[in-house]
Image (tube, rainbow, N blue to C red):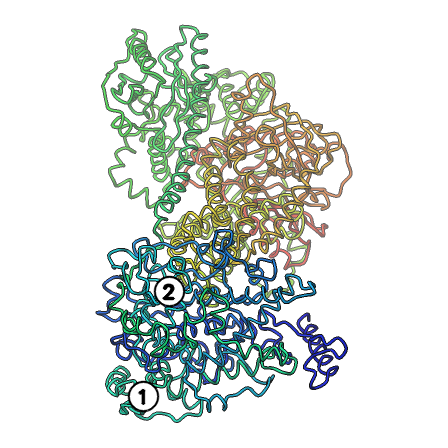
């Protein structure tokens, strides 16, 4: 819009000027006679008001010939053309030193170079860089110096709006204006021009401050002028600071001393005009700005005249007729002035054949200067001193040296006194092989570059170009130059055409490139037909299309009088007026040098008018350069330091953990010393540590010798027994003593038991123990032999029979014993093992009493254990052999009731008298009660015994014989006969089930009429006959016991799973169960992984395909593809981590229906998985960027300037690896991120959380710094614009709001007044209930412990009921925090201190809290999933006992658990429910799903003992509960079906399940199946853990 307004304004202004003046006024005001002129802009825009962009800087070159890109769009032409090196050598190589046939001077040649610099600059490479390298032929001289196969060649910059399709092929850019507008004096921008000005009297700034007023100011401000490395300085291989140059309008004006001389000339010419204008300003009204603009106008006007009417006729050797033919006839706004591709890439390069190898400098007296050591930095070995002229190839980019030595006038006069090279095809070696290049390729072949540049720009072949300009195409090579046979006009021998050119192009003239074809047209008159036409066309268009051309009479910058002044100014006048050259010091026409002119004879004598390269110093040799040089140390040290840092973090973690353990051990040592000091001498208590095996942690223990014939192993506080070694059954023990490794270890080897491996704190303590135990063993009261041997520590540990190894042997022992006793299928692995060498260990294995008690899950001093063990140990050896154990198991497995009664009789016939006294019978019953911690008052026990004796008619008997005992227990013989290993639980044999029918989905199937349902009810009642009776309260004396009504219609059956027989079946079964249980998690994990892969793939594709030729992709290849994909994946994963930590949000969502589809409880697990993904991609990104940084540090500085535009560096600076890594925000923050990630990940490991949890918490809270660094890392824009926010913003907002909620929440410290460490790693916490805390049974809270971090909350279901005054939790130690909480409330940790306080957040609800809304509720808990139901069960009983009215009339509680080991803590709750449930509201069933192959002897012994004890005591042997215990999985469809018959009037039954997904899915399936029939609807609510 701004451009459009400016356009309209200028048009309107010109219209007014044109219309308000007469045709002859030429811009003068009629009254004041003041001329109104518009000053020309700098950037070329708005020269043409109809087309403002015509002639503008940074615009595309124009095409006068059709493009010939291979693909029609952008791929370089000439794919089928010869190697440019071969063309250069074949057609342009030859002897130099022949002068111009037209007497043209070097002055004319280099004046032409600065004319080109005025209208054309397309040398800068494209960005991103595109390499179109030229292959170096074998045997080429470059191969001798440079170990490369190709000469680097960068394609030109181009208009980014072109090159997408054949309709708009790629068009290269002209970075300056094509106008002759003083761009090489002032630059093409106002800013650049201002940088050159002094802002005083309209002048350009001089170097007067440094004592050089004759020169422009030095570039101390660092203008971005071209600054390639000076090739002559081959020994230094370095770049020089751009500040050494003079400030000029032409960025390339310091290329060589000849070009610089003209730059200085125009600098002085401007200041001449500034002085003149100021001097002629008699009014004093003109300020600096006005003077500057006027002086600039006159410089431009005179320069236009000199170029078109002096230099161009000399360059093209135009006669008067030709000049008249091309005379100016006014401004033509319809002419496009832009430089054409063919002019840029071929025609105007004709001047290369005229360039001289060197220029001789002279003074006013015609004395020619010889070179000195101050003339250049050329090494001495190239003999640069004492030469007649400065060598062109050795003066590149150090031009100020010879100019400062003799002045720029010496160059201007010297160039005017020297003929240029002859007009022919021969190019001197300074250009054809020794032109300047980059550091890695210091010398290049400019002729090969010319050819390659034409191909880069898509130029067609030579004949196509001729036709495009209306010229006749050539059919033969000889026709290219018709004058080759004409001795008068010939400049090129015909052999060059017919042999060299034809051979190199394989005789195909239609493949000849424009540059060699046009060059070989050259005649003695100069450029041939094609180049002459192109050049003249170009300069005509530039002139005729320029509104500010000095000859323009209509709205032009000059009046007629001013034009006359310009017409009278010649190049000679400029030299005289602007320099110290005086009239007569130089010829009138510096473009030609004729005989008789000033210094002609001296020039003939000095160098025969034209200097030969043999008269000059040699060009320095080509050299290469490794850009990575200087980065080696920083590169290695950086990555080495990163590796050391990572290892250091691991080492630090280990050291801190070890120190912590050491502190704990020291504390324990101090405690042990204190204990030993306070202990009585008779106890002989020794503190040490037990080695438990490879991979097992050591545990602190205390060993007590005695009392009696025993060695007891206790915990370090001495209040818990780990093991008792009964020496009475051993004849000898062996002491293995370690003589190495600081002499701290020893082993007590006990036959038929596992070894005790001990590690003492000091050698002295160990020796004291050895001395005491030897004395103890040799004591006559003990009388046990001992053997002492020395064994090296490694061998000792290898030989040790650890508890783990012993346990494996015992497992095989029991598996094989039960398999044989019950004739069951055996695990194939056990069969194999039984036939192997291990069989010997199994058959010879003997159980100690302690192992026997542990197998029964009883205490070793239990009366039941004593009696059973004494009975089984037939040989009184103190151990139970395999055969002895098998005999007793066979009786229970296959024996008849009499055998089992005899076994029980013998167990309690202690004195083996054959009579069982009344006291011994009481002892039998009491021992059974003792097993399950049940309690009987003596009077109650006496009453039970008396009742049993009376019922058998033994009121007067105090002793029972075996026959009497059989008669007493006779009523239970049926039960005893059924007391074999039943796969089902305590129910009768199942009745025949009706065949199930299957109906189509949606079909309602009626269950049958009322009579049929009644019939099935009667069948079930009689099928369970005996269960109700046998389950009566025969143990009526049980404290608190009540008569439990057994529902006759409700049938609960178990379903047994088949044990997999093969390894593949095992694996498949495990996989199936895993998928079943974790299917939701798997789904979301797979979905997340797919999204993550898509994020990675999108960036990878973008940098592989869409930006294949851009940026880092060009220099680092697919490494950038990987790193950018990894970077996006990192952004996604690290952002996702915040979502998984939005605890409040997850808590709220968990209460919605979404919890059925999203496993919110797995947020922490997902957090860990995402963190691992993030780590993986971080490592990939880091390693990838290590490789990328290597590539970056090995690239040319110009390429890096292009690729990383936001990272400025001066042109003489070679950014090394340490710059990119340590001095850029991207690199430095990347290093910090790597270091921080190492710390956070190392201290987030399980090992760290277990050993140094506080450091884990501290380092993990550094995430704020981590995310700040990630934001800064992307803001550096090293590779791409930052878009981390795209991933981060949403999660960050969610996380911030979530944190604000947590911060705003009141954190009241709640005192814990009771803490118990229950079996199965369960910690029971009872704490104060806040006054305002209201909740429902089944709800949960988030808990934080003050000592473990007040901000770390974990969710747990309340096990207390709403009516209770306190709150309680049962927390099982399954993770780091729960393990730490158990340790925190361990009495050994707390000691005399108060319990650590808690923070509580909640309560939060879930579906289970609605249990009371259904008349019949079924509660199904799986494993630890029973936790929500603990609170519900208490609440149920409270409501029932307090006569609270609520809809629920019956509750069935079913607990399915793999093993009963985990429910000890719940038994108390269930027992309390049973005691208070006077209305029989709750019916409880426990299902044990583990079977013997997975071996837990307690479960297996249940098969043997549970049935007996249930009949006698009306309680479960192992739980002490009246609840029924089953073995197997519940058949829920059968159970739900029976509920319909039991509760026919109920329309809805609520089913609430909590457990693993596999279990809840089974419940859901059963409900769905039942809902297919008419009757009550089963409404299912479930939660997964």
Relative to 808, is 924 above or below?
above
Q: Nearer the viewer, residue 916 or 777?
A: 777
Q: CA distance from mark 2 to mark 1?
A: 50 Å
Q: Position of residue 1003 (x, y in %)?
A: 63, 65
Q: Residue at the location (76% across, 41% down)? A: 1446
User: From the image, which quarter does the C terminus lie in?
Assistant: top right
The residue that label 2 is drawn on is 363
Q: Position of residue 1197 (x, y in %)?
A: 42, 57
**For residue 1333, what is the image quadrant?**
top right
Looking at the rendered structure, which numbered label has been put on residue 509?
1
**For residue 1306, what is the image quadrant?**
top right
Looking at the rendered structure, which numbered label has been put on residue 101?
none
Res. 1089 in view:
no
Q: Is residue 1453 left or right of residue 681?
A: right
Res. 10 in view:
yes
Q: Position of residue 914 (x, y in %)?
A: 40, 19
Relative to 1522, is 1531 above or below?
below
Q: Is residue 1314 left or right of residue 623?
A: right
Q: Nearer the viewer, residue 996 or 200?
A: 200
Q: Nearer the viewer, residue 504 or 1477?
A: 504
Q: Is residue 507 left or right of residue 872?
A: left
User: From the image, which quarter does the N terminus lie in?
Assistant: bottom right
Q: How many marks?
A: 2
> Tag 1's secondary structure?
helix
Looking at marks 2 and 1 on the same chain, the residue that comes earlier in the sequence is marked by 2
Q: Residue at the location (46% across, 51% down)? A: 1177
């Amino acid at each position: 819009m701004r451009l459009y307004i400016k356009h309209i304004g200028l048009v309107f202004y010109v219209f007014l000027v044109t219309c308000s003046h007469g045709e002859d006024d030429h811009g003068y005001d009629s009254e004041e006679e003041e001329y109104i002129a518009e000053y020309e802009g700098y950037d070329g825009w708005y020269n043409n008001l109809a087309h403002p962009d015509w002639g503008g800087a940074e615009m595309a070159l124009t095409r006068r010939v059709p493009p010939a890109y291979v693909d029609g769009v952008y791929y370089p032409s000439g794919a089928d053309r010869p190697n440019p090196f071969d063309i250069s050598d074949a057609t342009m190589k030859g002897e130099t030193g022949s002068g111009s046939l037209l007497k043209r001077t070097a002055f004319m040649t280099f004046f032409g170079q600065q004319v080109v610099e005025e209208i054309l600059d397309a040398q800068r490479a494209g960005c991103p860089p595109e390499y179109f390298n030229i292959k170096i032929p074998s045997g080429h001289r470059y191969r001798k110096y440079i170990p490369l196969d190709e000469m680097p060649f960068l394609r030109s910059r181009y208009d980014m709006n072109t090159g997408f399709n054949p309709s708009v092929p790629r068009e290269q850019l002209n970075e300056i204006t094509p106008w002759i507008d003083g761009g090489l004096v002032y630059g093409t921008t106002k800013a650049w021009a201002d940088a050159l000005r002094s802002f005083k009297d309209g002048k350009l700034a001089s170097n007067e401050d440094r004592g050089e007023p004759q020169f422009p100011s030095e570039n101390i401000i660092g203008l971005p002028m071209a600054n390639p490395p000076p090739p002559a300085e081959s020994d230094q291989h370095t770049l020089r600071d751009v500040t050494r140059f003079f400030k000029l309008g032409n960025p390339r004006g310091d290329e060589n001393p000849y070009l610089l001389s003209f730059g200085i000339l125009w600098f002085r010419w401007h200041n001449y005009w500034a002085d003149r204008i100021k001097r002629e300003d008699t009014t004093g009204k003109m300020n600096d700005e006005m003077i500057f603009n006027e002086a600039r106008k006159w410089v431009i006007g005179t320069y236009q005249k000199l170029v078109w009417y002096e230099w161009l006729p000399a360059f093209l050797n135009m006669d008067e007729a030709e000049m008249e033919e091309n005379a100016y006839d006014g401004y033509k706004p319809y002419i496009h002035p832009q430089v054409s591709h063919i002019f840029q890439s071929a025609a105007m390069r004709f001047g290369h054949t005229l360039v001289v190898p060197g220029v001789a400098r002279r003074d006013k007296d015609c004395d020619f200067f010889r070179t000195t050591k101050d003339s250049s930095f050329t090494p001495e070995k190239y003999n640069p001193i004492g030469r007649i002229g400065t060598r062109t190839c050795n003066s590149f980019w150090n031009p100020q040296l010879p100019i400062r030595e003799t002045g720029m006038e010496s160059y201007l006069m010297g160039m005017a006194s020297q003929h240029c090279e002859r007009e022919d095809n021969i190019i001197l070696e300074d250009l054809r092989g020794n032109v300047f290049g980059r550091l890695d390729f210091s010398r290049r072949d400019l002729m090969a570059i010319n050819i390659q540049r034409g191909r880069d720009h898509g130029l067609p072949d030579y004949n196509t170009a001729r036709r495009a300009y209306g010229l006749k195409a050539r059919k033969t090579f000889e026709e290219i130059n018709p004058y080759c046979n004409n001795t008068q006009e010939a400049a090129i021998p015909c052999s060059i055409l017919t042999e060299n050119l034809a051979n190199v192009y394989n005789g195909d003239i239609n493949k000849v490139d424009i540059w060699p074809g046009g060059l070989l047209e050259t005649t003695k008159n100069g450029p041939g037909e094609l180049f002459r036409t192109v050049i003249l066309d170009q300069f005509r268009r530039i002139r005729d299309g320029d509104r500010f051309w000095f000859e323009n009479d209509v709205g032009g910058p000059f009046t007629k009088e001013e034009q006359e002044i310009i017409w009278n100014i010649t190049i000679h006048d400029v030299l005289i007026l602007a320099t110290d050259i005086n009239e007569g010091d130089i010829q009138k026409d510096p473009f030609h040098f004729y005989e008789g002119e000033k210094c002609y004879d001296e020039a003939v004598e000095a160098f025969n008018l034209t200097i030969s390269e043999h008269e000059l110093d040699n060009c320095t040799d080509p050299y290469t350069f490794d850009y990575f040089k200087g980065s080696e140390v920083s590169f290695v040290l950086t990555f080495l330091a990163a590796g050391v840092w990572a290892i250091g973090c691991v080492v630090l973690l280990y050291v801190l953990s070890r120190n912590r353990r050491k502190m704990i051990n020291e504390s324990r040592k101090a405690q042990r010393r204190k204990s030993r000091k306070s202990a009585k001498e008779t106890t002989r208590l020794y503190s040490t540590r037990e080695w438990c095996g490879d991979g097992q942690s050591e545990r602190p223990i205390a060993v007590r010798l005695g009392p009696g014939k025993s060695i007891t192993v206790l915990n370090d506080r001495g209040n818990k027994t780990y093991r008792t070694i009964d020496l009475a059954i051993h004849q000898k023990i062996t002491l293995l003593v370690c003589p190495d490794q600081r002499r701290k270890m020893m082993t007590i080897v006990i036959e038929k038991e596992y070894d005790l491996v001990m590690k003492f704190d000091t050698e002295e303590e160990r020796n004291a123990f050895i001395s005491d135990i030897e004395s103890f063993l040799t004591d006559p009261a003990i009388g046990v032999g001992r053997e002492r041997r020395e064994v090296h520590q490694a061998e000792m540990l290898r030989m040790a029979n650890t508890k783990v190894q012993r346990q494996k042997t015992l497992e095989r022992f029991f598996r094989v014993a039960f398999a044989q006793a019950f004739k069951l299928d055996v695990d194939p692995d056990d069969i194999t093992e039984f036939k192997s060498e291990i069989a010997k260990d199994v058959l010879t294995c003997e159980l100690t009493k302690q192992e026997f008690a542990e197998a029964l899950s009883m205490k070793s001093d239990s009366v039941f254990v004593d009696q059973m063990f004494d009975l089984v140990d037939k040989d009184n050896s103190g151990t139970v052999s395999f055969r002895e154990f098998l005999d007793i198991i066979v009786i229970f497995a296959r024996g008849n009731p009499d055998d089992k009664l005899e076994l029980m009789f013998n167990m309690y016939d202690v004195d083996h008298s054959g009579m069982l006294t009344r006291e011994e019978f009481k002892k039998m019953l009491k021992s059974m009660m003792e097993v399950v911690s049940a309690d009987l008052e003596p009077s109650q026990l006496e009453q039970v015994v008396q009742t049993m004796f009376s019922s058998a008619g033994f009121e007067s008997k105090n002793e029972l014989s075996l026959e009497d005992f059989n008669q007493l227990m006779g009523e239970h013989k049926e039960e005893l006969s059924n007391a074999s290993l039943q796969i089902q639980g305590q129910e009768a044999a199942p009745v025949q089930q009706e065949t199930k029918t299957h109906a189509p989905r949606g079909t309602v199937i009626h269950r049958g009429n009322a009579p049929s349902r009644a019939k099935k009810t009667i069948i079930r009642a009689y099928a369970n006959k005996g269960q109700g009776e046998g389950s009566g309260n025969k143990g009526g004396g049980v404290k608190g016991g009540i008569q439990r009504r057994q529902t006759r219609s409700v049938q609960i059956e178990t379903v047994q799973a088949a044990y997999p027989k093969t390894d593949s079946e095992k694996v498949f079964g495990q996989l199936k169960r895993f998928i079943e249980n974790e299917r939701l998690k798997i789904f979301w994990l797979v979905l997340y992984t797919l999204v993550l892969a898509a994020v990675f793939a999108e960036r990878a594709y973008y940098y592989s395909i869409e930006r294949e030729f851009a940026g880092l992709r060009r220099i680092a290849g697919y490494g950038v593809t990987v790193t950018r994909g990894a970077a996006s994946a990192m952004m996604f994963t690290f952002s996702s981590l915040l979502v998984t930590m939005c605890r409040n949000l997850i808590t709220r969502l968990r209460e919605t229906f979404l919890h059925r589809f999203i496993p919110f409880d797995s947020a922490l697990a997902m957090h860990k998985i995402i963190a691992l993904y993030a780590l993986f991609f971080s490592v990939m990104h880091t390693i990838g960027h290590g490789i990328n940084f290597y590539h970056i540090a090995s690239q040319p500085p110009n390429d890096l300037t292009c690729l990383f535009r936001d990272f400025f560096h001066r042109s003489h600076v070679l950014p090394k690896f340490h710059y990119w890594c340590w001095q850029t925000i991207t690199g430095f923050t990347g290093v910090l991120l790597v270091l921080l990630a190492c710390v956070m990940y190392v201290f987030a490991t399980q090992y760290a959380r277990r050993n140094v949890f506080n450091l884990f918490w501290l380092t993990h809270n550094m995430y704020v710094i981590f995310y700040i660094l990630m934001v800064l890392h992307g803001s550096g824009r090293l590779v791409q614009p930052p878009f981390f926010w795209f991933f981060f913003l949403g999660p960050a907002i969610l996380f911030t709001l979530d944190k604000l909620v947590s911060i705003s929440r009141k954190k009241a410290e709640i005192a814990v007044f009771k803490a118990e460490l229950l079996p199965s790693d369960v910690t029971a916490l009872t704490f104060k209930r806040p006054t305002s805390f209201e909740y429902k049974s089944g709800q949960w809270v988030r808990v934080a412990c003050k000592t473990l971090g007040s901000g770390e909350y974990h969710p747990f279901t309340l096990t207390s009921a709403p009516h209770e005054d306190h709150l309680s939790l049962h927390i099982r130690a399954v993770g780091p925090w729960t393990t730490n909480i158990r340790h925190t409330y361990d009495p050994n940790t707390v000691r005399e201190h108060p319990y650590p306080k808690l923070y509580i957040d909640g309560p939060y609800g879930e579906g289970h809290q609605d249990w009371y809304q259904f008349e019949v509720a079924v509660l199904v808990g799986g494993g630890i999933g029973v936790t929500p139901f603990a609170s519900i069960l208490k609440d149920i009983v409270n409501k029932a006992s307090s006569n609270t009215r609520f809809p629920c009339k019956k509750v069935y509680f079913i607990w399915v658990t793999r093993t009963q080991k985990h429910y000890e803590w719940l038994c108390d709750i269930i027992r309390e429910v049973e005691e208070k449930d006077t209305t029989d509201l709750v019916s409880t069933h426990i299902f044990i799903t583990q079977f013997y192959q997975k071996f837990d002897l307690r479960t297996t012994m249940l098969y043997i003992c549970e049935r007996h004890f249930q009949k006698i005591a009306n309680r479960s042997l192992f739980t002490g509960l009246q609840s029924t215990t089953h073995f197997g999985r519940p058949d829920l469809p059968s159970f739900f079906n029976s509920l319909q018959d039991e509760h026919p009037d109920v329309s809805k039954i609520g089913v609430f399940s909590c457990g693993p997904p596999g279990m809840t899915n089974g419940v859901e399936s059963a409900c769905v199946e039942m809902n297919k029939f008419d009757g009550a609807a089963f409404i299912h609510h479930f939660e997964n853990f």
